[in-house]
Image (cartoon, rainbow, N blue to C red):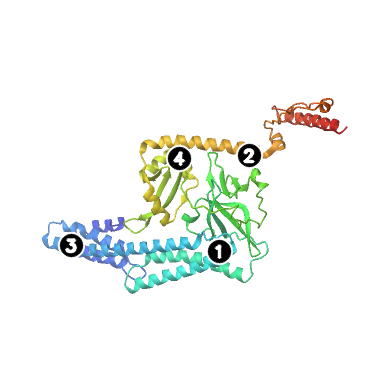
């Protein structure tokens, strides 16, 4: 397709003859070149657009010459498109290798994803090897006079990430990371399911430079882990509820919050998992188990399902229905999902990401999704979410205990004092029965009732002591 500038040029030379059109087409080939001086796709497309009108000019000689030139340019464009497709396929393969270089589920006794310091050297070395592989691929293609634009663009981005990790590695090995220094340019990304806290693996990534598809949905937590003497921020995937609150979960520890700031620990879990600065630690596999990623009921999953005609990786979406069947979701169905407020909220929250190998298994299991199920799925998922929220709130209040519920002004119920069979001597000394505990009312009434309750209980034990 010729550009707007070229189309105006065609209009100006239309009456000037076929010879000038051929010169203008040749000029397009010479001016649209890459760094190696090879004509790009745009050059051939513009040349074809310039000469195309002369095929139907009605002048036999011009039509034949124009047709011959267009056919030659079209063949060159086809070959170039195939080379660019090969480039894209090569870049796609390198990107998958890079993803493997970051996230690891290796769970050995020494190193592995549970030791952030071990990830520094492993990740840096992997990226340097990948850079070398891309450079070799570029040299090979240039030796065969093939285009390398796409590969060079990827190499430029990859180099920035590799340089950043190499610099961190050097400082770490030389002991140059200062005491208490906050490494804000990097993050310990724990790949976890925010719904149940189970862990799949972890990575150490340069913040802002890592591929967006790897860090999408992650939020910084009010937690840091030590790398040498420095503090490394912790990141985790989040789930967003209907109130706009983000929640991350690692094991039984929960972080939540709104806005763009770091997520904080909730009151219900702070007492059990209060990670002090620099003390975030997931080395205990019993408290922080590894679980293979799966698509839970009413949830989505995503993974690479293949490549398009240009060789670019194509992602596929999967959905586990409330009937426990796994469905493949095409783009049309996905747009309909987004119209449902409950299902759209799920899509906006945590979506499990699968490796290419795992995705192949999902494809075998999945079946197409039918349109009539969408509204029913939204209603069922909504009911389940409300039930889960209500249960979570009930569990939280239960964990607060008596004093916590009084503090929050919630309903307080004391266990009833039950009578039991007494002996003759016990019956002679019947204790004073304390007043009932407060059962509701305002916060002030509850507190005052609580005081009366404990005064009565005190009298009870005083009488027993006499």
- In the rendered image, the quadrant that contains the C terminus is top right
* Residue to which mark 4 is pinned: 343
State the separation of the CA atoms marked 2 and 3: 78 Å
Q: Residues within 10 Å of mark 2 (few under 14, many from 20)?
A: some
* Residue 446 picture location, percent across and down: 73, 30
Q: Is residue 319 left or right of residue 436?
A: left
Asked whether the beta carbons under mark 3 and mark 4 sit within 8 Å of each other, the answer is no
Counting residues from the N terminus, which is met first, the one under dot 3 or under dot 1? 3
- Is the residue marked by circle 1 packed among few (<14), some (14-19), or many (20+) residues within 10 Å? many
First of labels 2, 1 by sequence position: 1
Name the front one of labels 3 and 4.
4
Q: How far apart are labels 2 and 1 at the CA level? A: 36 Å
Q: Could you tell me residue 457's position as x and y percent?
A: 80, 31
Q: Tell me if residue 209 can be seen.
A: no
- 361 or 191, nearer to the observer: 361
Counting from the top left corner in percent of width and height, residue 250 is at 58, 50
Callout 2–callout 3 Cβ contact below 8 Å: no
Q: Is 131 displayed left or right of 394 in the figure? A: left
Check if mark 2's residue and mark 1's residue have beta carbons within 8 Å. no
In the rendered structure, find residue 65 and report the number of the disc placed on it: none
| Residue drawn where x is 45% and y is 46% of the image | 300
Q: Which residue is mark 2?
A: 396
304 or 321, which lies in front? 321
Local secondary structure at mark 4: helix
The residue where tag 3 is placed is 66
| Cα distance in 3D space between marks 4 and 2 | 26 Å
What residue is pinned by disc 1? 119
State the CA–CA distance, disc 3 to disc 1.
Answer: 60 Å
SS for callout 2:
helix
Across the whole image, how many numbered discs are drawn on residues? 4
């Amino acid at each position: 397709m010729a550009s707007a500038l070229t189309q105006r040029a065609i209009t100006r030379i239309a009456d000037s003859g076929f010879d000038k059109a051929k010169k203008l087409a040749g000029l397009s080939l010479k001016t649209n070149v890459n760094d190696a001086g090879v004509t790009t796709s745009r050059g051939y497309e513009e040349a074809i657009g310039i000469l195309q009108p002369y095929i139907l000019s009605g002048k036999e000689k011009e039509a034949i010459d124009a047709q011959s030139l267009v056919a030659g340019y079209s063949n060159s464009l086809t070959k170039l498109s195939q080379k660019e497709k090969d480039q894209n396929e090569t870049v796609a393969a390198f990107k998958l290798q890079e993803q493997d270089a970051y996230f690891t589920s290796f769970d050995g006794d020494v190193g592995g994803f549970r030791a952030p310091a071990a990830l520094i050297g492993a990740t840096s070395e992997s990226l340097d090897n990948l850079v070398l592989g891309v450079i070799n691929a570029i040299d090979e293609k240039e030796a065969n006079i093939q285009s390398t634009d796409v590969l060079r663009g990827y190499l430029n981005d990859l180099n920035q990430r590799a340089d950043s990790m190499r610099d961190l590695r050097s400082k770490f090995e030389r002991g140059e990371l200062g005491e208490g220094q906050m490494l804000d340019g990097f993050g310990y990304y724990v790949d976890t399911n925010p719904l149940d806290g189970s862990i799949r693996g972890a990575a150490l990534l340069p913040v802002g430079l890592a591929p967006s598809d790897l860090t999408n949905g992650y939020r910084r937590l009010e937690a840091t882990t030590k790398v040498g003497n420095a503090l490394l921020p912790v990141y985790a995937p989040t789930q967003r509820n209907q109130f706009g609150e983000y929640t991350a979960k690692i094991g039984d520890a929960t972080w939540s919050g709104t806005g763009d700031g770091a997520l904080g620990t909730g009151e219900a879990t702070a007492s059990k998992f209060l990670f002090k600065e620099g003390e975030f630690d997931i080395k205990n596999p019993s408290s922080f188990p590894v679980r293979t990623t799966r698509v839970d009921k009413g949830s989505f999953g995503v993974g690479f399902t293949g490549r398009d005609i240009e060789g670019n990786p194509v992602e596929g979406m999967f959905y586990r229905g409330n009937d426990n069947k796994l469905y493949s979701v095409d783009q049309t169905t996905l747009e309909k999902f987004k119209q449902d407020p409950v299902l759209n909220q799920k899509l906006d929250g945590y979506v499990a990401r699968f490796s290419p190998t795992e995705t192949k298994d999902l494809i075998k299991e999945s079946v197409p999704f039918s349109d009539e199920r969408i509204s029913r799925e939204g209603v069922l998922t909504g009911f389940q979410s409300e039930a889960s929220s209500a249960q979570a709130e009930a569990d939280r209040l239960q964990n607060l205990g008596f004093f916590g519920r009084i503090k929050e002004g919630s309903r307080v119920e004391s266990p009833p004092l039950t009578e039991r069979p007494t002996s003759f001597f016990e019956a002679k000394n019947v204790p004073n029965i304390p007043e009932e505990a407060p059962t509701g009312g305002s916060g002030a009434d509850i507190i005052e009732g609580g005081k009366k309750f404990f005064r009565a209980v005190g009298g009870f034990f005083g009488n027993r002591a006499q």
